[in-house]
Image (tube, helix red, strand yellow):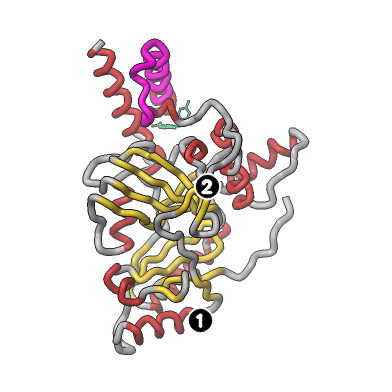
Amino acid sequence: ANDVAARVTELHETLHKYNYQYYVLDDPSVPDSEYDQLFQELKNIESEHPEFISPDSPTQRVGDKPLAAFTTVTHEMPMLSLDNVFDETEFRAFDQRIKKLLGLTEQDTVEFACEPKLDGIAVSLLYEDGLLVRGATRGDGSQGEDITLNVRTIPSIPLKLTGDGYPKRLEVRGEVYMPKKGFHRLNETAKAAGEKAFVNPRNAAAGSLRQLDPKLTAKRPLEFCCYSAGIVEGGALPESHYAVLNQFKAWGFLTNKEMACVQGIDACLEYYKGLEAKRDHLAYEIDGIVFKVNRFDLQKRLGFVSRAPRWAVAHKFPAQEKITV
Ligand SMILES: Cc1ccc(Cn2cc(C(N)=O)ccc2=O)c(C)c1
């Protein structure tokens, strides 16, 4: 039996590696057929030897029975909302306020982390000893719904963290979204089946996460992109936001390949204009750019006003005329 155990371990490690290459690096080293062959081999071993089934096995993503209802999760750390700015004047005022509060001069520049604001659903993922133990929606920021069974079906959400050095308890926050291609394919299928179409990818992602039956969620083309940490216990993270995102990528999470770290508000405006120009060609819908003061020590000095941090804003794009599908 220990050669079965050895083979199971080897299959876990190999499939985990291939998933990472495919979903996080977007650079598979083997054809889908080879992945599928190993996946089927693991499924066969598990059906003959159920004692070898573990929660982090790639075969355990789709739960079999629907929930009667979602239970409520109280976030140990509230999931914050961001202040919006809508134009360059407001954006520059944001930068001025920060420099004033930090005692910086006109000539000084603050380093900002820049990320597209994906138009999806904010989700919290809790990992204990590297294993995914809970997924929850943001809800009202203090309480959300437990959607663990549904987030497990999303291939770009790791069931087990990659590599090592992660904290004992780590909460990873990010956006669950539906890429445009998957959205249009889903609506074609819905229309062909005489079902209602979704108005936009954000609603489609929300509707897919709110399914009580994880088998339905598993059929929806959802992705997860991380954007911050929540709880960190029994370990430490890097000292800046951008470094944390790169660390999350090493631990198995998808990060947005447009993300950048720039010096000063003028560079932020260049980044904003650059991304606005290519917004229609992106594989996913975005409704602005999130700019964060990159260094955590400066974030701490700036703090929050009520629930929104002083150190970050979402700089929104002008609303687009919605095409009716
Ligand atoms: C049959 C089949 C198997 C796998 C996949 C997608 N895919 C590929 C890999 C890979 N190439 O490393 C890894 C994970 C994964 O999910 C598709 C689309 C179809």
**Closer mark to the observer between disc 1 and disc 2:** 2
C-beta proximity under 8 Å, tags 1 and 2: no
Q: Disc 2 residue type?
A: Thr
> Would residue 214 be counted in the magenta stretch?
no
Q: Which residues are the magenta region?
A: 35-57
Q: How many marks?
A: 2
Q: Disc 1 residue type?
A: Glu
Determine the secondary structure under disc 2. Answer: strand
- Identify the residue shown where x is 46% and y is 64%: 80
The majority secondary structure of the magenta stretch comes to helix
Please give the label number shown on residue 90: 1
Please tell me how crowded label 2 is: few (under 14), some (14-19), or many (20+) other residues with Cα within 10 Å.
some
Please tell me how crowded label 1 is: few (under 14), some (14-19), or many (20+) other residues with Cα within 10 Å.
few
Quarter placement of the N terminus? top left
Q: Is residue 299 above or below residue 156?
A: below
For disc 2, the marked residue is 72
Task: Answer with left or right where residue 212 lies relative to residue 268.
Answer: right
Give the CA separation, mark 1 to mark 2.
37 Å
